[in-house]
Image (spheres, rainbow, N blue to C red):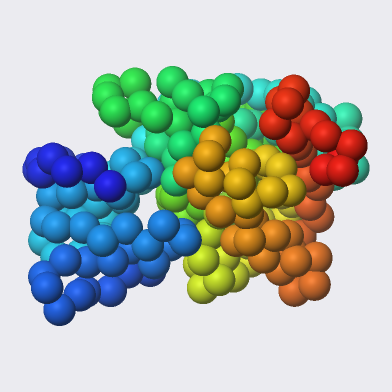
Amino acid sequence: MTRETEAFTEIHPGRYWHALDDGRVRCDLCPRLCTLHEGQRGLCFVRACHQGRIVLTTYGRSSGFCVDPIEKKPLNHFLPGTPVLSFGTAGCNLACKFCQNWDISKAREFHRLTDSASPGRIARAAVETGSRSVAFTYNDPVIFLEYAVDVAKACHAKGIKCVAVTAGYIEPGPRAEFFAHMDAANVDLKCFTDDFYRRLCSGRLQPVLDTLKYLKHKTEVWFETTTLLIPGENDSDDEL
């Protein structure tokens, strides 16, 4: 978690947290379970403690939009050959040393985020661009769950599907709510060893496996997995 305190000018009430006896609050969204004093942000940098509660500081703000082929997410067997409206915000709850979108996922200056990305506007933009779906991508959408869920509701009202591009690092309670509003997902399975997750991602493998099992056995969400191979780290014969 970050140590500095600050005033938050744009906030949205967060879910999945509880107050501790020592005056701090604990964020229960992801396995990090960040415990925060007033004014502190979690490792994701977008969930913070404000007036004794967890708030989301990037609701309604985007780092940019792009119309992509759905295969770029990548999803090869969900609405193949169709366009998808892609967008993200800032921040991430992992700290991968090989992150390809580090300038977004670890952004600390929110001036790069636009101020005109309400759920309704995103749904309308998808219709106007002929996109069959909207993808939450560039950074992990689980950290802006409240925003992603509202966007998904607005999109579904217009017949637009929703796609999550995620590392699957989320606790069971919020996981159920989040994926209840998703039609498809690409889960970034970094590797098959806990050592890799701890050394290179500052995370753990088991919560990701739990998410994959949940998607398979408890939902109707279409999902595919992606693994970025790093020579000498996760490309051994045993792991592959």
* 16 relative to 87, above or below: below
* Total numbered circles: 0
Q: Quadrant of the C terminus?
A: top right
Query: In terms of depth relative to the viewer, which is nearer, 199 or 201?
Result: 199
Which residue is situated farthest in the bottom direction here? 21
Residue 132 visible within the image: no
Residue 84 percent location from the top left of the image: 71, 33
Residue ID at (48%, 44%): 202
Query: In terms of depth relative to the viewer, which is nearer, 129 or 225?
Result: 225
Residue ID at (53%, 59%): 170
Residue 236 visible within the image: yes
Residue 13 percent location from the top left of the image: 28, 60
Residue 69 percent location from the top left of the image: 77, 26
* 145 relative to 230, above or below: below
Residue 54 percent location from the top left of the image: 26, 60
Residue ID at (47%, 55%): 145
49 to the left or right of 118: left
Residue ID at (32%, 58%): 34
Query: In terms of depth relative to the viewer, which is nearer, 111 or 16?
Result: 16
25 to the left or right of 152: left
| Residue 75 position by quadrant | top right
